[in-house]
Image (spheres, rainbow, N blue to C red):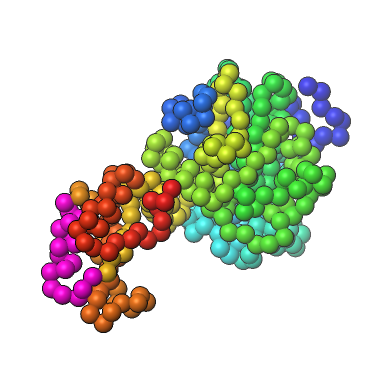
Amino acid sequence: MSEGDDQPVSIEAIEAARTVVAAVAHETPVFGSRWLSARAGAKVLLKAENLQRTGSFKIRGATNKLHQLGAAAERGVVVASAGNHAQAVALAAGTLGVSCEVFMPADASIGKAAATRGYGATVRLGGESLEEALVTAKAWAEETGRVLVHPFDDPAVIAGQGTLGLELLEQVPDLATVVIPLGGGGLASGSALALKALRPEIKVVAVQAAACAPFCASIAAGHPVPVETQVTTLADGIAVRSPGLITLPLIERYVDEVVEVGEDEIAEAMVMLLERAKLVVEGAGAVGVAAFLGLGGGSLRLDRAGTTVVVLSGGNVDTGLLTPAIRRHETNSGRRMVLFSRFSDRPGQLARLLSCIGATGANLVEVEHLREGYELHVRETGVHLTLETRDREHARSVVEQCRAAGYEVREVGGALSG
């Protein structure tokens, strides 16, 4: 494939970056996934960039960029990042003895900020978004003479990220489709360029979080169209409100399809990867898998011929996010339920209800007495019962048996309605 003279990134630049990146980054493994293959109706593999150094693909672009800076790096570098780019540049800078300052949004992941400091960088928190952090970082670079290392809209960074595409071509000879997360577009554009330059028949699908999905509108308009409102998403690592001036044309040229996924699918994908693949993957890294969880709606179609690879782009997730995600998954699958019951406030009533539940084989996790907030008779009491069950059928059986025993019982949250 011949590249236009005005294109800022080329396959030659990506191939040159391969040796530079290999000196620092790992060649991450590709794992089979029977459960995902069964769901997709095609052979699906997982590219585990969550096992990369610093926990994401970002070390590729950071390493290549700092290598190209040469003597200019001695002035120090400055970074704006939600966390993954910050860690990567901090590590790359540390290996070269280069000073690194990082600007992160005020609500950035606590774990990512701490890890960045651990790599030797100075971290400054402020602003409501990556875009605001980037404005501050640019101003600081101009004031101090430091070199700004952009998180995605930089040819050297894009070329470094593109080395992932070269790895996939070597690791998966019958590669047919690549499903890859899409934030600012550095990883998706670089990898797609590498894949299309060497194997133009390969299909590349880029996946955005629906809560922050500027690319579809930007592609239609032919220029970057920002997301106007501040967003909250589990995929904070790809919550970029506007595409880059460099990445947008590359995405338009080399990516075949851009799809969006919702927060429920992202949360489910994180837990499924933990449960089935034994891999800890952050929301931004799990959006490719989340796209398959919407297959019932027909949003993503795969060719049964050849192999599909889903890129898990990062694993830097705050542990505090995992517990609610796991509980949501258990509730949706019928393995965890909360019941409300009301009965006469007389000795022995609760004990009899709990005996009934025990007879069903459900495991009691928590009991909460409710005296206020419900329309209870003065001689009534209410309780919330949190239970662990085997599956939806078992959960329904628990409710039915309690009602058969004469107790008023209803589920809180509606997990059994699906």
Residue 243 drawn at (x, y percent): 73, 48
Magenta region includes residue 354 = yes
Quadrant location, the N terminus: top right
* Left or right of 93, for residue 400: left
- Span of residues in magenta: 343-359
Q: Quadrant of residue 188?
A: top right
Residue 315 drawn at (x, y percent): 49, 44
Residue 225 drawn at (x, y percent): 77, 52
Q: Residue at x 73, y 27 (%)?
A: 11
Residue 106 or 201: which is nearer the viewer? 201
Residue 254 or 191: which is nearer the viewer? 254
Res 315 visible: no
Residue 329 or 377: which is nearer the viewer? 377
Q: Residue at x 71, y 25 (%)?
A: 196
Q: Residue at x 82, y 47 (%)?
A: 221
Total of numbered circles in the picture? 0
Magenta region includes residue 318 = no
Q: Quadrant of residue 285?
A: top right
